[in-house]
Image (tube, rainbow, N blue to C red):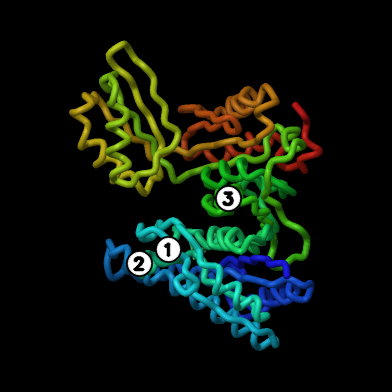
């Protein structure tokens, strides 16, 4: 029988009624002939509440204990879900990550999946059961519980689809799909019918917040079609899939804003081999994830170097830079935590010209100053003042007609 993986987010499981409704979606798939594997997140705001509980007792809780604690949210979801299915007359069995050999590395709170033992799940499916797996968690080689980082249940779901060799993975959520941009800021943002893995990866890591970026990476690697859809409405949502030629007809697929960033400028660093490596080795040692690195030569002897980091890594990054500051002969460190990054994303950028002009023009017209610009093959990003971020996203979204369905937008 064909297997389908269905993941339910926390908001779709917030109370008994919602769990019942989610169970109905599962039963519907069973009735249409699928063997169903359900992945569930912690209910409602439970993960946030558990974090708050932890911080009340210890401002710097041991990460291992944090994982031990946070994993309980998902464990509650799957057992309650199994009970709801049982009440409806369906055979169901729930597992924690550890129970199905969801093996990860030992980086607590940010673990990465290494392998999955699909046998136990397969055996239960073969016996006609609905299998429920607690999302977001795994176990390391020493038997310690790990978690995959906030939003990690998406990754559990897509990784399970890969391990079970199915191409179907549905992500049920409280929105009806993925929008071209954040509808809370740009009210009329259109729902995307489909989007490529590469676009979604850019958008997810740029803070679109809809999907865990690692989930998209798994999807791309193993060719899993991911369907993000509403847990309430029946209509199709957004399919994340491999790129098809028509996708290039669309100039820009989406726009994002990222507000939780900080920018670090290192001024007049000695311009000699090995210095950039030293800076980023020091940051890597402090586990700081760095984005959008820019370096420009000032003179033969000196260079300026800037990069973006998540604001939560700012203290760690400052310390890391202080440690090597004299070694690289850095004359000044400037830090901005009042910035936001606005980006437009689209595989169509490879074949359309004038995209940069359209974006910068829209920002200029709205009198938004651009601090710095970075690009990739399918993305243009501008750092702007945080207090202008929403306005910037709106004018850029308007310029690329992100309120219209893709096929109705101007082609150039
Ligand atoms: N419960 C976890 C979180 O809130 C994982 C997830 O929802 O995917 O981040
Ligand atoms: Mg999520």
Residue 79 vs residue 326, the one in the foreground: 79
Q: Is residue 358 left or right of residue 135?
A: right
| Badge 2 vs badge 1, beta-carbon distance below 8 Å | yes
Say if disc 1 is inside 8 Å of ligand 1.
yes
Marker disc for residue 216: 3
| 311 vs 39: above or below | above
Looking at the rendered image, the quarter that the N terminus falls into is bottom right
**Secondary structure of residue under mark 1:** strand
Marker disc for residue 66: 2
| 255 vs 62: above or below | above
| 203 vs 295: above or below | below
Residue drawn where x is 66% and y is 34% of the image: 347
Task: Give the mark nearer the N terminus: 2 vs 1.
Answer: 2
Task: Give the mark nearer the N terminus: 3 vs 1.
Answer: 1
Percent position (x, y) of residue 244? 73, 40
Looking at the rendered image, the quarter that the C terminus falls into is top right
Residue drawn where x is 63% and y is 70% of the image: 37
Residue 360 vs residue 133, the one in the foreground: 133
Ligand 2's quadrant: bottom right
| Label 3 to label 2: alpha-carbon separation | 25 Å
Task: Give the mark nearer the N terminus: 3 vs 2.
Answer: 2
Q: Residue at label 1? A: 147
Q: Sort mark 1 into few (<14), some (14-19) or many (20+) by Cα contacts within 10 Å.
A: many
Residue drawn where x is 69% and y is 26% of the image: 351
């Amino acid at each position: 029988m064909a297997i389908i993986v269905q993941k339910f987010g926390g908001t779709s499981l917030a109370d008994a009624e919602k769990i019942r409704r989610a169970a109905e979606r599962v039963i519907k798939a069973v009735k249409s002939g699928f063997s169903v594997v359900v992945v569930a997140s912690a209910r409602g705001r439970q993960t946030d509440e558990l974090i708050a509980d932890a911080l009340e007792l210890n401002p710097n809780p041991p990460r291992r204990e944090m994982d031990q604690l946070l994993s309980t949210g998902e464990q509650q979801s799957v057992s309650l879900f199994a009970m709801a299915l049982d009440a409806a007359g369906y055979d169901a069995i729930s597992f924690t990550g550890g129970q199905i050999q969801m093996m990860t590395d030992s980086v607590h709170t940010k673990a990465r999946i290494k392998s999955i033992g699909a046998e136990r799940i397969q055996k239960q499916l073969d016996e006609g059961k609905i299998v429920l797996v607690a999302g977001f968690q795994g176990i390391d080689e020493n038997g310690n519980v790990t978690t995959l980082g906030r939003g990690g249940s998406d990754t559990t779901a897509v990784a399970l689809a890969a391990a079970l060799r199915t191409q179907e993975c549905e992500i049920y959520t409280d929105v009806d799909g993925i929008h071209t941009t954040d509808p809370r800021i740009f009210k009329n943002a259109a729902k995307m019918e489909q989007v490529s893995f590469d676009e979604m990866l850019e958008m997810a890591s740029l803070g679109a917040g809809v999907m865990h970026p690692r989930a998209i990476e798994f999807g791309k690697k193993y060719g899993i079609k991911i369907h993000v859809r509403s847990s309430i409405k029946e209509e199709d949502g957004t399919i994340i899939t491999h790129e098809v030629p028509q996708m290039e007809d669309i100039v820009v697929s989406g726009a994002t804003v990222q507000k939780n960033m900080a920018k670090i400028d290192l001024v007049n660093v000695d311009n000699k081999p090995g210095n950039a490596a030293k800076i980023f080795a020091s940051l890597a040692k402090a586990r700081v994830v760095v984005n959008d690195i820019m370096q420009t030569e000032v003179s033969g002897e000196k260079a300026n170097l800037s990069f973006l980091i998540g604001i939560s890594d700012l203290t760690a990054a400052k310390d890391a830079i202080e440690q090597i500051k004299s070694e690289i002969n850095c004359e000044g460190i400037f830090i901005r935590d009042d910035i936001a990054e606005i980006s437009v994303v689209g595989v169509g950028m490879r074949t359309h010209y004038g995209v940069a002009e359209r974006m910068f023009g829209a920002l200029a017209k709205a009198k938004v100053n651009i601090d710095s610009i970075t690009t990739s093959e399918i993305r243009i990003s501008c750092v702007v003042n945080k207090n202008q971020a929403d306005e910037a996203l709106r004018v850029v979204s308007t310029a690329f007609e992100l309120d219209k369905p893709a096929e109705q937008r101007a082609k150039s």
